[in-house]
Image (spheres, rainbow, N blue to C red):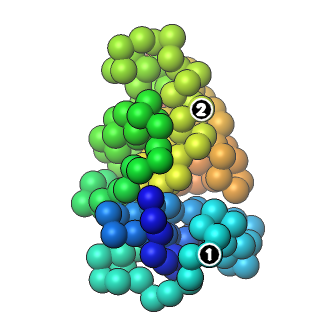
Amino acid sequence: MNPEGFALFDTAIGACGIAWGARGIVGVQLPEAGEGATRSRMQRRFAQVPEVVPPATVQAACDAIRALLEGELRDLAEIVLDYEGVPDFHRRVYEIARRIVPGHTRSYGEIAAELGDKGLSRAVGQALGHNPFAPVVPCHRVLAAGGKPGGFSAHGGATAKLRMLMIEGARPPSDTAPLF
């Protein structure tokens, strides 16, 4: 992973950050407490990488993320991610999560079962907790057992996760408690 640049962009939930390289997006940052905090987080994550105007393909990714966070049901599948340096297990979890349709959810256990072992639920949660591409890899769409929100490593924690799900009009599985 060789980042070429990063940029901040406004969304309905605050300033997000995005970093890119020759092979795709290397990181996305959900909003921190304010634009300055988001910029500082990006500068720590991508030290020595300049903040510059994004090229057209990256601007298109920013526009798609912005649309999702404004309530358009966008799956962001067109955004190319650079998985270099991402552990294989995490990459597999992220690829499954990317297939979750906006407005829908899956559980950590369901993803673990798709990976071949329902006992991997905690490992799935840990991988999603290290997701460098949120919301392109929509970890907010992955819930704990019983439709509970579970953890969320972005600023605002589970409240931010529920807010993003609400923006998407998500509904819990029919056999679980309401999300909100």
Q: Locate residue 91: give its quadrant.
A: top left
Q: Please name the residue shown 27% across and 54% down the image.
A: 77
- In the rendered view, tell whether residue 16 sits above or below residue 157: below
Task: Give the residue type that dot 2 points to.
Answer: Gln
Out of 98 and 68, give the one closest to the viewer: 98
- In the rendered view, tell whether residue 56 sits above or below residue 32: below
Find disc 2 in the rendering and name its residue: 126
Q: Please name the residue shown 39% across and 50% down the image.
A: 83
- In the rendered view, tell whether residue 4 sits above or below residue 169: below
Q: Few, some or many C-alpha atoms within 10 Å of disc 2 (few <14, some 14-19, many ≥20)?
A: some
Find disc 1 in the rendering and name its residue: 48
Q: Few, some or many C-alpha atoms within 10 Å of disc 1 (few <14, some 14-19, many ≥20)?
A: few
- In the rendered view, tell whether residue 166 sits above or below residue 152: below
Per the rendering, the mark at residue 122 is none
Task: Give the residue type that dot 1 points to.
Answer: Gln
The spot of residue 23 in percent (x, y) is 32, 63
Q: Are marks 1 and 2 in contact (CB under 8 Å)?
A: no
Q: Is 24 left, or right, of 45 in this rendering?
A: left
Of the two numbered discs 1 and 2 on the same chain, state the one appearing first in sequence.
1
Out of 134 and 75, give the one closest to the viewer: 134
